[in-house]
Image: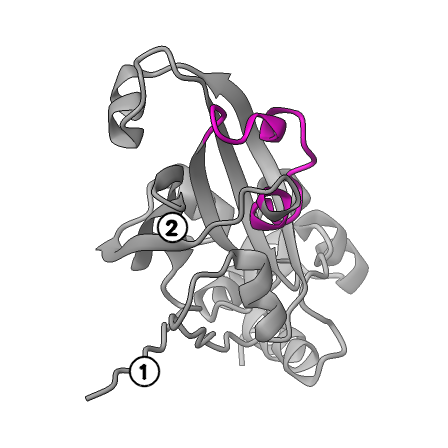
Amino acid sequence: MPLYRQLELQIAALIESGEIGPGATLPAERQLASDLGVSRTTVQHCYSALRRRRLVSAHGRLGFIVEGPTEKLHPGMERLKGFTEEMRELGRAASSKVIERVVTHDRSLASLFQQPSTAPFLKLVRIRFGDDVPLSREVAWYDLGVAPELAEADLSGSVYDRLREIGCALTRCEQTIEAATPDVDECAVFGFEEPLPCLLIKRRSFAGERMVEYVEGLFRGDAYAYRLTLGA
């Protein structure tokens, strides 16, 4: 059996047994090759095989991060809830990384919200994690005319919780789900070596009759299978 294959099986066994847990960073290729007395090419082939099995993902300078065996999430869609609450219901720890946060004025956006062209909006781009595994890249806009406190609020957690705290709780949403292919940047976020099918969820959320949020969230298709309960 080739050396890279032996190494792949050994690391995979450690991941699947839990000895190397999700979120752990594997040694750099050069370091592991030196420690084991094998060529760097052997380690490269091993890590590539682990990526194809979706046990690890590449994150640039952060190196290779363990994802663990992929288990699809099956969240329900029976009511309006945010990512943080959804993860809580699934028994996972939710976290976020803010990529972009800016107050903007956009005529097309204002038209979507049915507000004047000069209306201010908060644009928020975040990577959403469940148990430190990147599950979604989310681009959202919020109407600061109805929720001005969001401009300075801590939004590293649940935006929906912040909205409730300022007296602007969401009451309903309109949502669509489409098949989508991730671009290069989105593949890098999810650790995909090549584009894999994803779910694009578009949501318009309202407080009463006023639209407060428009969000487009790209969810990795290898981790999500939404569940709906339909009555007769």
Q: At x 70% / y 48%, what residue is drawn?
A: 30
Q: Residue furthest left?
A: 232
Furthest-top residue in view?
Answer: 118
Q: Is residue 96 left or right of residue 117?
A: right
In the image, is 112 to the left or to the right of 151?
left
Q: Earlier in the sequence, mark 1 or mark 2?
A: 2
At mark 2, the secondary structure is: strand
The answer to whether 115 is drawn above or below residue 6 in the figure is: above
Q: Which residue is mark 1?
A: 229
Q: Residue at x 47, y 52 (%)?
A: 136
Expressed as whole percent of the image width and height from the top left, the position of residue 52 reads 44, 66
Question: Which residue in the structure is indicated by mark 2?
Answer: 218
Magenta range: 143-163
Instruction: Find residue 191 and report its horizontal and vertical position in percent.
Output: 49, 52
Of residues 26 and 226, the one nearer the viewer is 226
Residue at position x 58%, y 66% in the image:
87
The correct choice, above or below, for 86 with respect to 181 in the image is below
